């Protein structure tokens, strides 16, 4: 089956995302847009993925739990997992390696945790914008060790992207595909919205071939691009 996908979306737990990017609102908007497989990828946390996956299921969507990791080099890499247990274990691993700096909501925005009824249940006190003490060269293998897959995010951008930071593509990074095309990168790529607000969730346009309607099948399809 071919499914319309968007595998890079931020909820209100990301300080830079709108407060109304609740998992329920994201899934409702994705459904309206015709998407079928969507991933939640907040900065350096999987704190809202369990609610997100339940909301996705309620809408008949494939919910993929994930994270947009900021590496030590300040490179963004999206990490996706086959289930919430794996994602939350990865999240705990990353949290231990994040700088212990409190979030200043006036500067960065709120980091809102959402409960089962899609209402706020609290805020993450530690700033999620920082760089985790995890190197980009270790990221692909690390995600895989949790059963997931990682890819460098928005590599054509001038900030927080692999090409902007490293200045070149290195095959020994271990990634097998990227997000967006990059000069000198000889790999297949996928296209995601990186939406931080509901209005930026795009209409369905890009498809991925998967063997069954599950997050695991999405991971498997990405690994074999
Ligand atoms: Zn990013
Ligand atoms: Zn992002």
Image (spheres, helix red, strand yellow):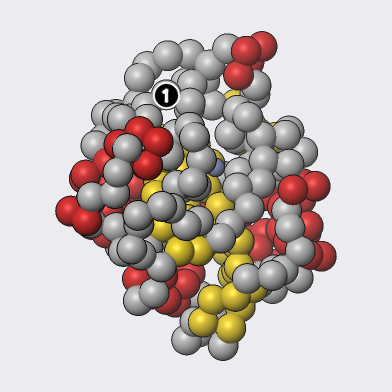
Task: Return the residue found at the far left.
Answer: 172
Q: Image point 35% across, 71% down: which residue?
A: 223
Q: Residues within 10 Å of mark 1 (few under 14, many from 20)?
A: many
Figure check: 55 above or below 119: below
Q: Which residue carries the number 1 mark?
A: 130
Q: Is residue 163 above or below residue 111?
A: below
Give me the residue at 78% from left, 59% from top. 28
Coordinates of residue 171 in the picture (x, y in percent): 22, 56
Q: Who's the residue at 47% across and 72% down the image?
A: 218
Residue 39, x across and y down, in percent:
55, 57
Count of picture labels:
1
Camera-nearest residue between 154 and 20: 154
Q: Position of residue 225 (x, y in %)?
A: 39, 74
User: Up-down: is 206 above or below 17?
Assistant: below
Closer-to-camera residue (53/148):
148
- In-image side of 141 versus 217 (left or right): left
Q: Secondary structure at mark 1?
A: loop
Q: Left or right: 190 with respect to 87? A: right
- Pointer 1 residue Cβ closer than 8 Å to ligand 1: no
Which corner quadrant holds the N terminus?
bottom right
Q: Residue at x 73, y 41 (%)?
A: 197
Q: Is residue 104 left or right of residue 171?
A: right
> Can residue 60 be seen?
yes
Note whether residue 51 is visible.
Answer: no
Residue nearest the observer in this picture, 172 or 54: 172
Q: Can you name the residue that lies furthest to the front here?
A: 184
Tell me which corner region of the image, top left, top right, bottom left or bottom right, holds residue 204: bottom right
Residue 79 point in image, percent of width and height: 40, 52
């Amino acid at each position: 089956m071919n499914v319309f996908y968007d595998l890079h979306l931020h909820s209100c737990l990301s300080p830079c995302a709108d407060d109304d990017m609740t998992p329920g609102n994201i899934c409702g908007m994705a459904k309206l847009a015709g998407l079928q497989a969507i991933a939640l990828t907040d900065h350096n946390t999987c704190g809202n993925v369990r609610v997100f996956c339940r909301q996705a299921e309620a809408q008949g969507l494939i919910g993929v739990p994930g994270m947009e990791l900021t590496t030590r080099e300040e490179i963004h890499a999206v990490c996706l997992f086959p289930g919430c247990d794996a994602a939350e274990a990865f999240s705990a691993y990353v949290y231990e390696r994040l700088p212990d700096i409190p979030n200043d909501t006036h500067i960065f925005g709120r980091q809102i945790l959402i409960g089962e009824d899609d209402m706020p249940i609290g805020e993450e006190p530690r700033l999620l914008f920082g760089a985790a003490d995890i190197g980009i060269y270790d990221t692909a293998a690390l995600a895989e060790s949790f059963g997931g897959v990682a890819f460098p995010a928005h590599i054509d951008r001038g900030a927080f992207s692999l090409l902007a930071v490293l200045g070149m593509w290195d095959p020994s990074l271990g990634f097998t595909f990227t997000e967006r095309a990059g000069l000198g990168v000889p790999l297949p790529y996928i296209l995601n919205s990186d939406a931080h607000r509901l209005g930026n969730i795009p209409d369905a346009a890009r498809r991925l071939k998967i063997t069954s309607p599950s997050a695991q099948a999405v991971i498997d399809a990405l690994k074999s691009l």
